[in-house]
Amino acid sequence: MKNFTLFLAVMSLTLVVASAPAAAKGPVVVSSAISEAEVLAAQNAWGEALVRISRAHDEGGQARAAAVAAEVIDGAYGYDYGVVLFKPTLAHGEHTFRVDRQGALAYFVGGDATYPGDSGFALKGWREFEIRNAAILIAGDLALTMGNVVLVDQQGQVTTVDKTWGFRKDAAGDLRIVLHHSSLPYTP
């Protein structure tokens, strides 16, 4: 089965290259490989989006934050391409793991009766973030990262979360989050 899957992948790539218009200079290059710069840009976009959702809540309430969060989720996560493995920082019990868009949106902004324990992680007044990667593993069109996200709220309080992300490149060449695992650091 593995050889057949590889055969299909090579044939698909051959068809794409064969059907591409001839370049005026040089060969046509088709690559879905992810670069470190793309990973760092995607992580920063996530941090900026979290701050944007927080500010939308401060300026327009929960409904405005939900609209911004929905936009962010649709632009950053891969729910349109399949399952996303999502484990929020403060989730517990039967809702610890989320595999659908509704679960992610509920976590970020709350207000969903299906997830009554969610108060809206993105509504906590976040103003700054810093991504501290311990490692980035890139394998073709899949990138995995692990490290910390340091968040600062409007009162200057700092919260550090352990974060693991998985990114996959979509057909348009954009990175999509397909794995989001977040937890508070262990304190013995």
Image (spheres, grey):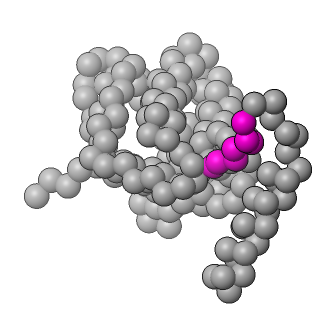
Looking at the image, residue 35 lies above or below residue 139: above
Q: Is residue 141 magenta?
A: no
- Who is closer to the viewer here, 7 or 72? 7
Residue 62, how many percent across, how many down?
60, 27
Residue 166 visible in this rendered orientation of the protein: no
**Which residue is found at the position 56% from the left and 37% from the top?**
109
Q: Position of residue 24 (x, y in %)?
A: 81, 30
Would you identify the image quadrant in which residue 10 lies?
A: bottom right
Identified at 41% across, 23% down, the residue is 125
Q: Establish if 104 lies above or below 68.
A: below
Whether residue 174 is visible:
yes
> Is 122 or 25 nearer to us in this picture?
25
Residue 156 image position (x, y, % from top left): 26, 19
Task: Give the dominant element type of the magenta stretch: helix, strand or loop.
Answer: loop
Across and down, in percent, residue 67 comes to 68, 29
Is residue 40 toward the left or the right of residue 148 in the image?
A: right
Q: List the single residue furthest toward the bottom.
A: 1
The residue positioned farthest toward the top in the image shown: 59
Can you say which quadrant of the picture contains the N terminus?
Answer: bottom right
Q: Residue, x 25% and y 29% (percent of image)? A: 158
Highlighted range, magenta: 26-32
Q: Closest to the observer: 185 or 113? A: 185
Q: Is residue 31 magenta?
A: yes
